[in-house]
Each structure stands twice: as C-alpha cells, then as structure tokens.
C-alpha cells in the first residue's frame, strides 16, 4: 500500500512540469522521507497515473546530485525525479512513485496533483 504524501501540487492546464519526490530521512529534523542515512534509491523507478490516463510522464530517474525539495536539501540518491504534462482543467490526478532501495526495500509514495484551470 502506498503512503499518500501530505502535499498537493496546484498546476494549470497545458503546463509541462518537473517534479521530485523526497525519500530522505533527516535524523536531525525527524522522519520525513523514510530512507535510512546510508540507504539509497537504486535502479529505474516507476511513476504511474492512478485512475486516469491524461498525463504523459517522462524523464523518470533517481536524483544524481543534491537538490532542494520543499526548502530542504535532499542528498543524491534520495529522491525520484520526473516530468509530467497533459493535465485537464478541474481535475485531480493521483501519481504513484515506486522505487527500490539498496536495502532491498520497495518504497511506494502517492502524490496528488490538482489542475485548477
């Protein structure tokens, strides 16, 4: 079962956007993304739309450098990045991101994208 992240992206119809899902565990800030300090994402993640087929999802990959996500620095190998487009106005989209870790775990997260206009 996927963990539904407590974030929603509001977008406009016709946009092509880049996204990143944070799996990092910050020992000083508390559990946030759920990977242990030494654990990394590995292989090619999957990113799929749940319940509809409007979106085109491309460029799916594990992060290869540190990047800022939601105002915090996430180390390389601790995030999944992808691009998406094709949103229709007044529609919510649920996206499922599945990745493997170096500890042989499958980590699954869902995020909701709202296309308001």
Image (spheres, helix red, strand yellow):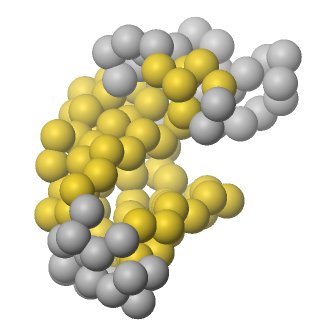
The residue shown at (38%, 36%) is 80
12 to the left or right of 53: right
Asked if residue 43 is positioned above or below residue 2 in the image, the reply reads: above
Which of the 4 quarters of the picture holds residue 57? bottom left
Residue that sits furthest to the bottom in the current view: 90
Q: How many numbered callouts?
A: 0
Instruction: Establish if 62 lies above or below 99.
Output: above
Question: Residue 96 occupies which quadrant of the picture?
Answer: bottom left
Does residue 85 lie above or below 66 as drawn? below
Q: Which residue corresponds to the image point at 41% horizontal and 19% vertical from the top-left?
A: 77
> Can you give x and y, in whole percent of width and height, for residue 17 in the image?
29, 52
Asked whether residue 57 appears in the rendered view, the answer is yes
Query: Percent x, y for residue 39?
Result: 53, 17
Quadrant of the rendering where the C terminus is positioned:
bottom left
Residue closer to the observer: 66 or 61: 66
Task: Determine the residue positioned at 73% across, 22% down.
Answer: 26
Between 104 and 42, the residue placed more toward the observer is 42
Q: In this view, does 1 lie to the left or right of 60?
A: right
List x then y, in percent, for residue 76: 43, 14
What residue do we see at 32% from left, 15% from top?
A: 64
84 and 12: which one is in front? 12
Residue 40 makes an appearance in the image: no
- Relative to residue 31, is residue 78 depicted above or below? above
| Residue 1 location (% of width, % of height) | 53, 64
């Amino acid at each position: 079962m996927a963990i539904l992240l407590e974030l929603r992206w509001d977008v406009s119809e016709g946009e092509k956007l880049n996204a990143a899902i944070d799996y990092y565990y910050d020992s000083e800030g508390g559990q946030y993304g759920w990977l242990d300090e030494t654990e990394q994402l590995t292989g090619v993640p999957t990113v799929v739309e749940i319940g509809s087929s409007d979106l085109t999802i491309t460029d799916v990959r594990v992060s290869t450098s540190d990047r800022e996500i939601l105002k915090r620095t996430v180390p390389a190998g601790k995030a999944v990045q992808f691009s998406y487009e094709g949103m229709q106005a007044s529609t919510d989209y649920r996206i499922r991101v599945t990745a493997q870790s170096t500890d042989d775990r499958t980590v699954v997260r869902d995020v909701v994208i709202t296309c308001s206009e």
